[in-house]
Amino acid sequence: MAATVLNGKKLSRQIEDGLQRRVARISSGTGGQIPVLATILVGDDPASATYVRMKGNACKRVGMDSLRVLLPEETTTRELLAEIEKLNADPRVHGILLQHPVPAQVHERACFDRISTGKDVDGVTAHGFGLMAMGAPAYGAATPAGIMTLLSHYHIPLEGRTAVVVGRSPILGKPMAMMLLNANATVTICHSRTRNLPGIVRTADIVVGAVGKREFIKADWIADNAVVIDAGYHPGPVGDVELSAVVHRCAAYTPVPGGVGPMTIATLIAQTVASAEKVAAGSGPAPAQERP
Ligand code: NAP
């Protein structure tokens, strides 16, 4: 049987249609207020600038506003923290995205963690991660949360199944593993010191490639009928998995492009709309929320 294509592009458009209606409802219920995502870009890395632009375009598509903060390459941690504080305190702003990676002199973790939990719509704070890991309400890290939405939409069973996540970054591999664990999968996390990676990947009903190396996960490591999630993003149509050689014998896979990437953006926008709905209902982030 042909593999199911987990079409993130198509699903993200459906999600955006729903978000457009929710944004219109917020606006009509609040006398014209619309959700605002603040995006912070530090430096002039062209790939990061493209990602931020794509997120701004998605805001426009659903009728939201984005507030762009551009900071120079030489920005210090202290300066970036001050910008984040301003956005935390700005009642117009419902969500804050700090584009990863920031220049080397900036303490990225300290800056992520300064984002108030209620505006952490990209799911990057340690507090948000902790809540999510405990099964408490929190905005999930956008990429793995988008993957979970995709798996659920296509009714991919997770309970009791073996999932192998290759990569353990704070914004992707680790939260991915926790989300799969919360969905009752049996999860193995692999990284650069893992021994016998091919053998471990072969045990997986669900493989998630989150390595950042082109076609690093080889087709012959992947069991027949596995579900293949490729989060990798590189110039050219390849991800972290040698997909072309496995699509004919896996159960389902995310195409590259058009799989995980659009779901990340849709999730970020959806979580910003959810934050704005909370504010409209009087239960959202206070303008200057206490940090935990
Ligand atoms: P990252 O921070 O560089 O993390 C890479 C992970 O891969 C690390 O945990 C690293 O292990 C592991 N790794 C590196 N070499 C390995 C090896 N030889 N064997 C096993 N594991 C190895 O990358 P990231 O931010 O998580 O991103 C991963 C990929 O996802 C990239 O291609 C990125 O472009 C893509 N991405 C896509 C989206 C999207 O929206 N589509 C969003 C975010 C990221 P150690 O921890 O031991 O170093």
Image (cartoon, rainbow, N blue to C red):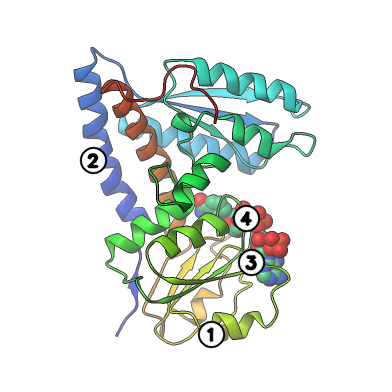
What residue would you read off at disc 4? 169
Tell me, yes or no, if residue 137 can be seen here: yes
Instruction: Point out the tag, 4 or 3, that comes first from the N-terminus.
Output: 4
Q: Which mark is residue 214?
A: 3
Mark 3 or mark 2: which is in front? 2
Instruction: Point out the tag, 3 or 2, that comes first from the N-terminus.
Output: 2
Mark 2 or mark 4: which is in front? 4
Instruction: Give me the residue at 34% from left, 26% from top.
Output: 276
What residue would you read off at disc 1? 202
Instruction: Point out the tag, 1 or 2, that comes first from the N-terminus.
Output: 2
State the image quarter where residue 183 is shown.
Answer: bottom left
Q: Is residue 236 above or below residue 86?
A: below
Q: Residues within 10 Å of mark 4 (few under 14, many from 20)?
A: few
What percent of the width, then of the height, locates residue 285? 41, 24
Q: Compute the Cα span from label 1 to label 2.
A: 38 Å
Residue type, mark 4 in image: Ser
Q: How many labels sit on residues?
A: 4
> CB of mark 2 within 8 Å of CB of mark 4?
no
Instruction: Give me the residue at 59% from left, 37% from top.
Output: 99
Q: Nearer the viewer, residue 193 or 269?
A: 193
Q: Compute the Cα span from label 1 to label 3.
A: 19 Å
